[in-house]
Amino acid sequence: MQTHEQLLQFIFSGLMLGSIYALIALALVTTHNITGILNMAQGEFVAIGALTACSFYEAGFSLPAAFILAVLITAIVGGFMERLAINPARNSSPLSLIIITIGVSIALRGTALLIWGTDPYSLPSFSGGESLHVLGAVINEQGIWILGLVIFAVSGLYIFMEKTYWGKAVRACVINRVGARLVGINPYILSFMAFVASGALGAAAGIVITPVTLATYDMGFVLGLKGFVAAVLGGINSVGGAILGGLLLGVLEMFGAGLVSSGFKDAVALIVLIIVLLVRPEGIISAVTGRRV
Amino acid sequence: MRVIITSVLGLLFLALPFIIKSNYLLSILIVIGIYTLVVEGLGLLMGYAGQVSFGQAAFFGIGSYTVAILTARYHWDTVAALLAAVVIPSAVAFIIGRPTLKLRELYLALATLAFGLLVHIAFNEGRELTGGPSGLTGIPYLSFAGLILNRDIHFYYLVWAFVLLVFLAVRNLDRSRIGRAMRAIRDSELAAEANGINTALLKLQAFVFSAFLAGLAGGIYAYYITFVSPSPFGFNMSVQFVLMAVVGGLGTVWGPVLGVGLVVALGEVLRWFIPLVMPRAGGEYQIVFFGIILVLVMIFRPEGLSGRWRKKQAAAEEGKGALETTTT
């Protein structure tokens, strides 16, 4: 028994899985910060992005072209969702809005079923390189791409928030929506942009894991749910929390699957969600940062 | 006038099985009755107490599995098993409701969703007890006092008798002090609290009552289908229950049965219609339309088809908005 190598393997695999959750959680947190909506259709963006990329790749596009096209198309889907379903109901109660996003998620999942059927689709791994061996644990080279994408997305978001006018507007909106409107920031445009961005982020997450897990029309439900758990775990208002929550959840799941049973893997996330909701609904991060956003 | 309409409707319902003569239609009416039981409870929770549950299919499933396990595995008396199918979900709701109902709307929705999914996983994974994904057979016919319920027409009367009881109960509740207190919670929890209403207790009661009805419906469902497997008790069913409650209209007695009737009828029509238009399509495609309808109803008629909710809700929203402006 090489226990420490096994544990290290759990941690590496968990971090790879967790960074996908982190990416989805990042999209959820961005939308929630700007619009106050928890988008239950986020997982569907992941599935649509992945499946669209597979279709483009099968149609003969190169992998990078398929990636970019799929991200663009899913971003458009996100924009349409905001215009057609969220914006007309922007004055509804939070309960109505959450039901609306669930309705959209059902409709999108059904549409994906119509277009792609129930077959799983696949993409080749991004670079044909060998797996890395670190201290006896194996790291799949697609895992490096996944981590790289997360770092890219996070730093992109950071630069956007800190350096651009729109980023400042977003932060103003987060701090005080009424105040932001008073100084001339239009929250409706920001809401639209938030959904476009979360479509793109979700799609990127879906495409980058497809070489490892395959893409199916219903992959979004579980992934979206894990994104939620990650976001709630980290604190629904905190970008750093979303990332930490995602990584933590990935590692916890891997340990749950490895040490208990693989059928138990999805239950881990749900149990974590319930415990966090009951014990610390504001998330683990806000303990450190307080209520400032 | 009201009395006449009600009696005519009542007589029509009693005579219906003899008029329609179609087992297919009769079975749909039974399913509508079963779902109505669930949705009356959910409607009470959402429309009166203002709380949403995305885990209602779990209580429905726990009721079904209670009947299945107790009768098929332990050979309990069928009526006793049905009682257990009511008691166990209520007890579960009581236990999980106490901490969960402290959560705000969004988090409550997530918590009930997580609970529903966990129960669904338990149905699949608890093979020794539940038979796993392949389910449990061998549920006997429901029988009491020498009467054996083994035909659709029996279930028709049984289910709708329960629905009638629930109608009367909800109607009375609506006009009672508790009903008014619940509506006060929905409109503003803070104001209700300030007026001396024990909001935590009332929300818990509504939650337990909704689980009670879902368990009852699940128990009857198990006897009707005589087979249980995890698939009808998943997240999709929970969403459909919410859809039915919302479409029918929240905060009314008739809303739930209207919503269930419409959604079930729509499901059946789509199941016939879609293959004509898209020959390759299977039954699952109807879910696209459910999603779209859910969105449209929430945007254009959030009070539902029979709702009398809009004005009050709008007023409540205004109040909330004002509160938000002053606190931020």
Image (cartoon, coloured by chain):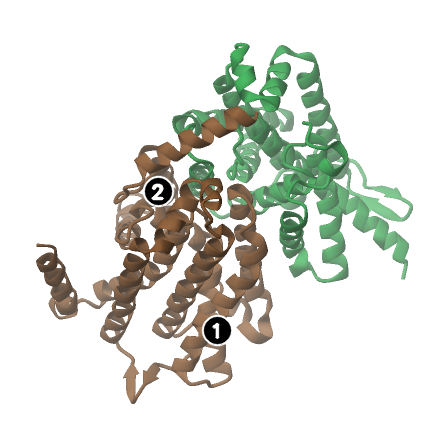
Q: Earlier in the sequence, mark 2 or mark 1?
A: 1
Q: Is residue A276 left or right of residue A115?
A: right
**Colour representing chain A:** green
Front tag of 2 and 1: 1
Q: Position of residue B98 (x, y in %)?
A: 56, 57
Q: Residue at x 59, y 34 (%)?
A: A28
Within-10-Å neighbours for mark 1: few <14, some 14–19, many 20+: many
**Amino acid type of the residue tagged 1 in the rendering:** Thr
Q: Which mark is residue A288?
A: none
In the foreground, A23 or B86: B86
- Is residue B232 shown to the viewer in this render? no
In the foreground, A277 or A78: A277
Among the chains pictured, the one given brown colouring is B
Q: Element type at marker 1?
A: helix
- Is residue A123 shown to the viewer in this render? yes
Residue bearing mark 2: B289
Q: Position of residue A283 (x, y in %)?
A: 68, 41
Q: Element type at marker 2?
A: helix
Quarter the C terminus of chain B occupies: top right
Q: Give residue A198's quadrant in the image.
A: top right
Q: Chain of mark 1?
A: B
Mark 2 → mark 1, Cα distance in angstroms:
33 Å
Q: Residue at x 62, y 22 (%)?
A: A175
**Amino acid type of the residue tagged 2 in the rendering:** Phe
Within-10-Å neighbours for mark 2: few <14, some 14–19, many 20+: some
Q: Position of residue B137 (x, y in %)?
A: 45, 76
Q: Is residue B224 left or right of residue A169?
A: left
Q: Position of residue A288 (x, y in %)?
A: 77, 35
Residue bearing mark 1: B66
Q: Give residue B168's quadrant in the image.
A: bottom left
